[in-house]
Every structure is written in structure tokens, then in C-alpha cells.
Image (spheres, rainbow, N blue to C red):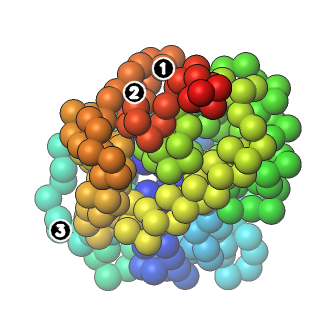
């Protein structure tokens, strides 16, 4: 699933190619992709003849601020979910098998939403409503990782209330918005924290290090234009480059880049966690080492 760096990469690409361009019309090829309004014709009419002032990102959501010459015109919301892609293409480009929505612009260009697994969604939010009233998932999001709100004190306070593995906690969008499996694994490795360590067992120094390394890996991936595991592409159809730099994610069975130990994988709440058993010893092993 695209996480914060991938969605941020798409946002920047969209701002490069679509700003101040008017949506002339569109075509919905899979009705259930449209989450709001329930009427597909109403969705298309709401967008028609509006222009894009700016694309924003909140967590893993993309939000296009729309306007007309006279007034604000609402918002276009997109969630890529597991396999969604937003591609800036010539309208003559052959339709992909999994094309779901097409938005048409001048110069025979289009913004095409392609989604193999069909979990992605799009919303048109009328101008008289804030986006979070229509896209209700926005209400559940915690602070952005790079925001002032995501401080060490905030993170410490939140983790003290969660007696669950730290890997599971990092995937909770109410704790921090936009982080998923890839960057939780990477940040835990660089922090030297085993993914099964309970949140309540973490010391403040570990929490400080975890916040720092989370920001570090997110920024490194943004700089590399995200991670492509299978389907992620930017708006020009280009793969992200972070995957080749990963410390542990998707590297089970390979040698740790730091100590040469074999990277392992385990399941936590149905999700994979990749880690180095030497660089990230379990809490019990850490206590034993400290007592020696």
C-alpha cells in the first residue's frame, strides 16, 4: 500500500502538471470507486469546469483544492489504498485493464486512476462542506510525522497508553498519520527496537530515537520518490527508488547490511514485520545483556 512518501511523491507530481488546469469532463469506469456523492453523474458534474488550485496530502489521502473563476468549488479527494495509481497521460494512451476513472483536461491530457485491487476511492466534496465531513477517515488521523504536534512528549504519552507491540502501534493512523509497514520496519531497525517490544516497555531515550529515525527514513524515501514493491508509480509512471536502499523491509533471508545476520520475518496482527535479531534484540534478551 502506498504510504506517506509514495503519496507525497504523487502530490508533488500532480502539483507539477495539473495546477490551474480545468477539468473539462470525465468518465467513471467502475462506479464503486466513487465514494461520494453516490451518484456518478453528480460526481462528474461537480468536477466539470473546475480548476485545481493545489494538491494537499493528509496522511495517505490526496486532496485537490478546486476553484472556478468566481469562487471555491470544493475538493477532489483520492485514497490510493493498496494498488491505486494516478497517471498523467495523453487521452490517446490505450486504457489499462484496471483503469477506473478518467478526468479530462485541455490538450488531450487526462488524469487516469488505475487500481488493480479496486480498493481505492475518490470523493467530490461540495464547496459548502469541509473535506473531513465527507471523507470521514480524515477525522481519525493523528498528527503528521513532520509536524510540531508529533513531538517526543506526544509520542511518549501516547505509547504509555498502549500495551501492544510497537510495530502494531506505528501502523495505527490515529497515533501518526501516513506510516505503514515499510517505514515502521525501517524506523524500528534504525532504532534498534525489536518489533514485538511492548510500547509500555520503551524508555524515553528509545522513543526519542524512534521518532528521529522515523523522520529520517520517511525523508530518505521522499527523496528517493518512494518505494515500488509491485504497483506503485508516480504520475509519470516511474517506479520509486527507496526499495533498493531498504535496511530490512522485504529482505527476509538476506544478510543485514550492518552486522551480516540473516534478516527474519514474523507476523504481528496479520502483518509482516522484518527485523535483524542481532541489531534489534528482544526486550528479554536486552534485559539479560544489561544484567551481565
Q: Which residue is mark 2?
A: 272
Q: Nearer the viewer, mark 2 or mark 3?
A: 2
Residue density around tag 3, few if under 14, some if 14–19, many if 20 or more, within 10 Å: few
Q: Nearer the viewer, residue 89 or 291?
A: 291
Residue 288, above or below 85: above
Single out the residue that lies furthest toward the left: 94
x and y percentages locating residue 110 in the rendered image: 34, 67
Residue drawn 64% across and 58% down?
212
Task: State which mark lies toward you, 1 or 3.
Answer: 1
Residue 268's disc is 1
Residue at the (83%, 46%) spot, across then down:
154
Numbered badge on residue 92: 3
Q: Is residue 195 above or below residue 163?
A: below
Quadrant for the N terminus, please. top left
Position of residue 213 measured from the top left corner of the image (x, y, whole percent): 57, 55
Q: Residues within 10 Å of mark 2 (few under 14, many from 20)?
A: some
Q: Are marks 2 and 1 in contact (CB under 8 Å)?
A: yes
Amino acid at each position: 500500500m502506498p504510504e506517506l512518501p509514495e503519496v507525497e511523491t504523487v502530490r508533488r507530481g500532480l502539483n507539477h502538471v495539473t495546477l490551474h488546469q480545468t477539468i473539462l469532463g470525465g468518465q467513471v469506469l467502475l462506479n464503486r470507486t466513487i465514494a461520494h456523492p453516490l451518484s456518478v453523474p453528480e460526481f462528474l458534474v461537480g468536477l466539470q469546469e473546475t480548476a485545481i488550485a493545489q494538491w494537499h496530502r493528509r496522511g495517505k489521502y490526496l486532496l485537490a483544492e478546486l476553484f472556478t473563476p468566481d469562487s471555491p468549488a470544493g475538493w477532489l479527494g483520492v485514497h490510493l489504498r493498496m494498488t491505486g495509481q494516478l497517471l498523467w497521460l495523453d487521452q490517446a494512451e490505450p486504457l489499462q485493464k484496471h483503469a477506473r476513472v478518467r478526468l479530462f483536461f485541455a490538450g488531450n491530457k487526462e488524469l487516469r486512476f488505475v487500481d488493480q485491487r479496486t480498493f481505492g476511492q475518490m470523493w467530490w466534496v461540495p464547496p459548502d462542506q469541509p473535506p473531513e465531513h465527507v471523507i470521514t477517515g480524515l477525522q481519525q488521523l493523528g498528527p503528521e510525522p513532520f509536524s510540531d504536534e508529533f513531538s517526543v512528549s506526544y509520542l511518549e504519552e501516547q505509547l504509555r497508553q498502549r500495551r501492544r507491540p510497537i510495530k502494531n502501534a506505528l501502523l495505527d493512523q490515529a497515533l501518526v498519520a501516513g506510516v505503514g509497514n515499510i517505514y515502521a520496519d525501517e524506523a524500528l531497525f534504525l532504532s534498534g527496537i525489536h518489533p514485538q517490544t511492548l510500547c509500555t516497555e520503551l524508555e524515553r531515550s528509545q522513543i526519542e530515537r524512534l521518532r528521529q529515525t522515523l523522520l529520517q527514513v520517511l525523508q530518505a524515501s521522499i527523496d528517493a520518490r518512494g518505494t515500488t514493491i509491485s504497483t506503485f508509480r508516480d504520475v509519470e509512471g516511474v517506479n520509486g527508488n527507496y526499495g533498493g536502499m531498504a535496511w530490512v523491509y522485504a529482505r527476509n533471508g538476506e544478510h543485514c547490511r550492518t552486522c551480516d545476520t540473516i534478516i527474519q520475518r514474523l507476523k504481528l496482527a496479520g502483518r509482516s514485520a522484518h527485523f535483524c535479531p542481532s541489531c534489534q534484540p528482544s526486550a528479554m534478551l536486552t534485559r539479560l545483556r544489561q544484567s551481565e
